[in-house]
Image (spheres, rainbow, N blue to C red):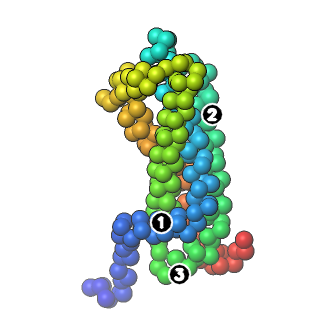
Amino acid sequence: MSSTGTWEIGEIKFPFSEAFRFSLENIKKRFTRAAITAASVVLGIAFMNSLMMMAAINQQVSGMGGIELYQYWLLFISLLVCAVGITNSMLIAVTERYKEIGTWKTLGALDKHVLELFLIEASLIGLIGGLVGYIAGLIAAVVYGVAFQGANMAQISAALFATRTLPMPLPTAPALLVLSLVVAVGISLAASLYPAYKGAKLEPAVAFRFEV
């Protein structure tokens, strides 16, 4: 009881470590859904990396490189499609978990806790998708260099580990790894904001009445 004679409810705390563990368990439990969401990230990031690495290889082999304006538009569209795919997948994921969200809230979870859980889950999916997409883009660029440019591995290595393609204080390949992870997590978070907010604002009574 407070000094004013009224009862006060203590603040409900949800440590980040627990939220992280809970989100990881949700991904494992719904692996197929998480894999579908991650696939959107993988395709977008793989296209971005292969495009930039191929430009670096072209410059190393033939002295001609750079990315054309239309290729930037293709990259923008591919990342936009990636974001739309993530949003759609997360909306379905939230809808499928209405009763679960209602249970969380009846046990004391606040809106911010539900929002945090979905955003951590989206970040993890983005991180995994970004890493896989980077590897896929790297493989595609190497195959392109060998098969279509006749480059040897020494030329490909020189192209991928020379600092000139990106305005970052890292060689091309490591810089693209950092960029891939940042873009993947950023897109996943941005695309998941609305679905996560929708789930966070769900009333328990409404959640328990909903039938999938």
Which-is-in-front pick, marks 1 and 3?
1
CB-based contact (under 8 Å), mark 1 and mark 3: no
The quadrant holding residue 3 is bottom left
Circle 1 — which element? helix
Label 2, secondary structure: give it.
Answer: helix
Looking at marks 2 and 3 on the same chain, the residue that comes earlier in the sequence is marked by 2
Q: Is residue 152 left or right of residue 8?
A: right
The residue under label 2 is: 77
| 33 relative to 2, above or below | above
Residue furthest to the right in view is 211
Q: Amino acid at mark 1?
A: Ser
Per the rendering, the mark at residue 23 is: 1
Q: Which residue is labeled 3 in the image?
A: 106
Q: Please tell me which of labels 1 and 3 falls first in the chain.
A: 1
Q: Position of residue 63 (x, y in %)?
A: 46, 10
Q: Nearer the viewer, residue 23 or 42?
A: 42
In the depicted structure, whether residue 133 falls above or below residue 189: above
168 in relation to 60, above or below: below
What is the spatial separation of the Cα atoms under label 2 and label 1, in whole angstroms?
A: 30 Å
Label 1 environment density (alpha carbons within 10 Å; few <14, some 14–19, many ≥20): many
Badge 3: few (under 14), some or many (20 or more) residues near its Cα, within 10 Å?
A: few
Residue 190 appears in view: no
> Residue 128 — which label?
none
Total label count? 3
Q: Quadrant of the N terminus?
A: bottom left
Q: Quadrant of residue 194?
A: bottom right
Point out residue 38 in the picture as x, y percentages from the top left corner.
Answer: 56, 51
Circle 2: residue type? Ile
Which residue appears at 53% of the width and 40% of the height? Answer: 136
Distance between mark 2 and mark 3 Cα atoms: 42 Å
Relative image position of residue 186 (x, y in whole percent): 47, 45
Name the residue: 66% across, 61% down.
92
